[in-house]
Image (tube, rainbow, N blue to C red):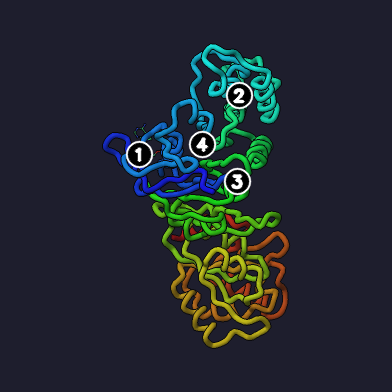
């Protein structure tokens, strides 16, 4: 059954339209997350649901009844709001603030009943603020104040709980504790919550609504909404989205790449293998270099990295010699690259063929990246040593660390 339903609303502040043609619903007892970049209208959407702002057009319905038809007291018995933060001007104690949640139930001339006190105490206990009951709200921390506001909302015993980034000030243990309490409420309470932390949203919400520039761009279960494509389109970030190993819910791992404006434009080709190139590939990708890699076999750990990062790679079947097609593809990559980085591993692993091809395309900077466990100086004897010596003689430089590779690439750009 629909607890909250929004039918095609537009919302404006003065002449500025903030939300356009928004329709959504929240089923009774579900947790619905609202996500989206700063300024996309999340708070405004919550305000429309709690009648703090009125839509220009369309309708908000609560339990199949227009929100506009509720009187103040009825509304406060149905909906509780936990705002981002509020300025509390008077010197109230924590208990007084939490008890305010009972106002919709206490008559103007009556005083609190034993049940009101019991509900208030239980909410303070659940949110771990009972020990602060007699403290002034001006003498507690931001995270404690956030828990007090959550306690006040619980004291209201609402049917719908609206949370605006209500756990953003909390440390990780209180975040989990509060979200677990909120999840335990569901069944009887519908929760609609704004989240900036996408992983918390994915973990706790039954469904998500993603906003961008006034509109809903995605809605559905977390795995349908949080995809690499939507994160790129809505937040402009590249991120890996994997199933959480324990919950199976999507887990977002941002790739901290530079924004387009300060990206280098050079292309770098990486010859690697056996996982020895993964941190380099990630660092180059993050810095915004246009990267290519290979030849790698499709079972290689570095191949998994390039696939995850979307780096173009010359691939070959395992245990096969480099095919003519892969060879010409590698030559094209090297020709297009401003510089080539070779990690120490492949030469030792019979990947000499890659380097041989490279030798014929040697008119560009070559960087040999040593690792903690393997250095190019270790290659003694045989063709490997001859190749390393040949590369060094022709001006290849050695680097001990990935950040040194980045520095050399910037210097040679
Ligand atoms: N009272 C107001 N008067 C005029 N414009 C406002 C008002 N409140 C918010 N806005 C504007 O409305 C837009 C949406 O704001 P809103 O707070 O709903 O976004 P949000 O998605 O919650 O953002 P954030 O993630 O930063 O909290 C913003 O451009 C904001 O500047």
- Residue holding disc 2: 141
Q: CA distance from mark 4 to mark 2?
A: 18 Å
Disc 1 residue crowd, few under 14, some 14–19, many 20+, Cα 10 Å: many
Q: Quick check: 303 left or right of 225?
A: right
Secondary structure state at the residue bearing disc 2: loop
**Residue found 34% across the figure and 40% down from its top:** 11
**296 versus 241 height, above or below:** below
Label 1 SS? loop
Q: Position of residue 21 (x, y in %)?
A: 35, 49
Disc number for residue 200: 3
- Which circle's residue, 2 or 1, is located before the other in the chain? 1
The residue singled out by tag 1 in the image is: 55
Cβ at disc 2 under 8 Å from ligand 1 = no
Q: Is residue 339 above or below residue 103?
A: below
Q: CA distance from mark 3 to mark 4?
A: 14 Å
| Front position in the image: 312 or 159 | 159
Q: Which mark is residue 164?
A: 4
Mark 4 sits near ligand 1, with its Cβ under 8 Å away: yes
Image region (quadrant) for ligand 1: top left
Of pointers 4 and 2, the one earlier in the residue sequence: 2
Q: Mark 3 or mark 1, which has the lower sequence index? A: 1
């Amino acid at each position: 059954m629909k607890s909250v339903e929004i039918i095609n609303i537009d919302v404006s502040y003065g002449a500025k339209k903030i939300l356009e043609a928004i329709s959504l619903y929240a089923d009774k007892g579900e947790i619905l997350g609202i996500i989206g970049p700063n300024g996309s209208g999340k708070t405004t959407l919550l305000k429309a649901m709690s009648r703090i702002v009125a839509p220009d057009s369309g309708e908000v319905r609560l339990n199949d009844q227009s929100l506009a038809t509720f009187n103040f007291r009825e509304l406060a018995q149905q909906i509780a709001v936990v705002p981002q933060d509020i300025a509390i001007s008077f010197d109230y104690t924590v208990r007084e603030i939490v008890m305010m949640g009972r106002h919709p139930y206490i008559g103007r001339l009556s005083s609190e009943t034993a049940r009101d006190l019991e509900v208030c105490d239980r909410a303070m206990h659940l949110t771990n603020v009972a020990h602060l009951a007699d403290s002034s709200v001006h003498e507690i921390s931001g995270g404690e104040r956030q828990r007090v506001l959550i306690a006040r909302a619980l004291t209201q015993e609402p049917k719908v709980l609206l949370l605006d980034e209500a756990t953003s000030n909390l440390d990780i243990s209180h975040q989990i504790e509060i979200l677990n309490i909120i999840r335990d409420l569901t069944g009887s309470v519908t929760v609609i919550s704004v989240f900036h932390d996408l992983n918390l949203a994915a973990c706790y919400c039954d469904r998500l609504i993603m906003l961008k520039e006034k509109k809903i761009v995605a809605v559905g279960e977390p795995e349908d909404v949080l995809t690499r494509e939507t994160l790129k389109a809505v937040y402009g970030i590249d991120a890996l989205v994997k199933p959480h190993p324990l919950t199976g819910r999507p887990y977002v791992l941002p790739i901290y790449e530079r924004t387009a404006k300060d990206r280098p434009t050079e292309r770098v080709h990486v010859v690697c293998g056996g996982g020895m190139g993964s941190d380099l590939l990630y660092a180059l990708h993050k810095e915004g270099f246009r990267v290519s890699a290979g030849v790698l076999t499709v079972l290689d750990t570095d191949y998994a990295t390039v696939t995850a990062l979307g780096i173009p790679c010359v691939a070959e079947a395992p245990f096969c010699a480099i095919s003519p097609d892969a060879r010409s593809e590698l030559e094209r990559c090297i020709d297009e690259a401003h510089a080539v980085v070779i990690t120490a591993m492949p030469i030792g692993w019979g990947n000499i063929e890659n380097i041989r091809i490279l030798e014929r395309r040697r008119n560009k900077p070559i960087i040999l990246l040593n690792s903690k466990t393997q250095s190019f100086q270790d290659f003694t004897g045989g063709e490997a040593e001859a190749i390393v010596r040949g590369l060094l003689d022709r001006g290849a430089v050695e680097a001990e660390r990935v950040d040194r590779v980045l520095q050399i690439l910037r210097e040679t750009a």
